[in-house]
Amino acid sequence: MLTDIPIHDVQPAPVGETAITACGLTRRFGDNEAVAGLDLSIRQGEIYGLLGPNGAGKSTTVRMFCTLLRPTGGWATVAGHDVADEPDAVRLRIGAALQEAALDPKQTGDQLLRLQGRLYGLRPDEVDRRVAELTSMIDLGEAIDRPIDTYSGGMKRRLDLAAALVHRPEVLFLDEPTTGLDPLSRSRVWDEVRLLNERLGMTILLTTQYLEEADSLAHRVGIIDGGRLVAEGRPAELKRQVGDDLIVAGIDGDPAVAAAAVVTLDRVRVVDAGEDTLVVATGDGAATVGPIAVALAEAAVPVRDLTLRTPTLDDVFLEITGNRLRSDARPDVPADERSEVQR
Amino acid sequence: MTTITTTPSPADSGAIVRARPTGFRHNVITIAGRALRAVPGDLEAVIPPVLIAIFFFLVNIATLEGLTEGQIAGFDYTAFQMPTAILLGVTGVSRAPSLVLDVQNGYLDRLLMTPMRRVAILLGHLVADMAIAVGLAVPILVLGLVLGTGFETGVLGALVFLLLSALWSLAFAGFGYAVALKTGNPAAVQSMFLLFFPFLFLTTSYVPRGQLSGWLDVVASFNPVTYILEGLRALAIDGWTIDVVWAVLAIAGVGALSMWLCLAALRSRVAAD
């Protein structure tokens, strides 16, 4: 490993300032442990990004926090109430937009929001006000009076978010809120998430596979893999632990020869050799990229391309778990086909 | 941080709005209202059963009236057929398929995340079903009155007639809701229609009990619909007889079974484990 990234190094927030706490939270489905002893502490007013690939346990975790699934081990509190013992108290204080927009296609957007308001005990004048505010927020225009089954995917997502906000929850859960959205719709959702957090101090837990989403929105990021929190911190902190710069070379020759050619160069900290890719971590990319090109040429390793970039959360995830977050994040080879050389 | 160029719209005025616990009755009415509002957009689920019931009502009278009234002195076949037609119209009509859709499209999860009691979701649908069943029974009842059927028990008897018909509809619908909640599968809910045939046809739908052949008479004696039909017919033809009590007990028995299955399926669906 490049560095010793702390695992479960969660500093509990002071009493009274914690919006979400999990301790040894576990959920089993038969023999499969979807969430395996998750420890988490999220402060009030924080945007926390839970980052991980499909099947990592993100959605199961959110469903336990939302009282839709009972933990099989450990415990969790949301807004000061235990999710297993006081689910009604939790439900009054949370809102959630789950992975698939949870909407009734036969209702109009307006009917759906009004029904939500009534079910949360809002008075008629409060329902009117909130529906007007939220309709303006999601900018559906006259479509708010059309049946939801006529909406586009982006419109459904925005309405789903509005439905989660009708009662102005203290804690908002967003499970992959922008998956499948076009870039414009995605940026609008990001705007609203920031606005809710900044103006109302709403605590927001969002799960995502999108690195840039966690990077852009979250005050802190937790990386989850195999149902466990494997790293946590501010995005910049996590990325610093991988290295300051990464040089990525697309190669056609023997990866072992390529790795051996560059590993002894000055300022090179780590070399990660894949089937056709060489990733070099260095403290000074600009000063190292030239010597690497020269070294590979001298070793007779054909180079297709050479790129200098800063680390991403994907690199953090790769470093910790040996896998990329998303299969389409970057062409890569499985961890067992890579070799890593550390100086 | 990525720079976003769109202008955020006001998400909230900042005015204090807080969720509050809601009453059970409020929740049942809210869910029933939603189920009833969906009916105009789903007329294909409620209109055909009434038309079929009216069709068979008229055809059966035309086919069997002469035969039965010739065999049994003082027999009024139109009054005899009216309860059959009404049960044909209201049996199996429910919003259970829409509950399956709620399960499939995740909307049930949204309802389950609200602070209302879980059983209110089920009861709200059932209340809506009762209202729909009464709405379906009325035109058949009116047709029966137009064709000359009277009510020995008067207006109160007619209202009890409608109520028992709606309660039977509810009792039968419970099986559909149990399957809907247990499986979340629309095909499985549709398959509950198979129950319709033994309940509605292995009984005294067309001729009085005394006219049934040996095996069918035995089967009919175990079929609760036999007692429901006889109770409904008593209200129209004979007056307040013990048959009305038997009808109530038969509906209560079937309803207790279907509601038990229903609540078990609901518990299983929302148990969060």
Image (cartoon, coloured by chain):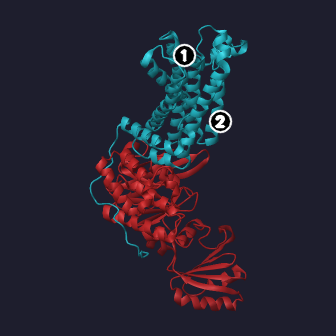
Q: Which chain is red?
A: A
Q: Which mark is residue A300?
A: none
- Subunit under mark 1: B
Q: Amino acid at mark 1?
A: Arg
B145 and A27: which one is in front?
Answer: B145
Q: Is residue B169 left or right of residue B219?
A: left
Same chain for the residues under marks 1 and 2 in the image: yes
Q: Amino acid at mark 2?
A: Ser
- Mark 1–mark 2 contact, CB under 8 Å? no
- Subunit under mark 2: B
The quarter of the displayed image where residue B191 is located = top right
Q: Is residue A297 left or right of residue B112?
A: right
> Whole-percent x and y of residue B127?
45, 33
- Which corner quadrant holds the N terminus of chain B? bottom left
User: Which residue is identified by label 1?
Assistant: B233
User: Which residue is identified by label 2?
Assistant: B191
> Callout 2: 10 Å neighbours few (<14), some, many (20+)?
few
Find chain B in the image and tell me its colour: cyan
Mark 1 and mark 2 lie on one chain; the one further toward the N terminus is 2
Q: Residue furthest top?
A: B73
> Whole-percent x and y of residue A316?
53, 70
Numbered disc 1: secondary structure = helix
Q: Residue at x 56, y 47 (%)?
A: B104
The quarter of the displayed image where residue A269 is located = bottom right
> Whole-percent x and y of residue A35?
53, 52
> Callout 1: 10 Å neighbours few (<14), some, many (20+)?
many
Q: Residue at x 59, y 87 (%)?
A: A265
Numbered disc 2: secondary structure = helix
Q: Is residue B241 left or right of residue A256?
A: left
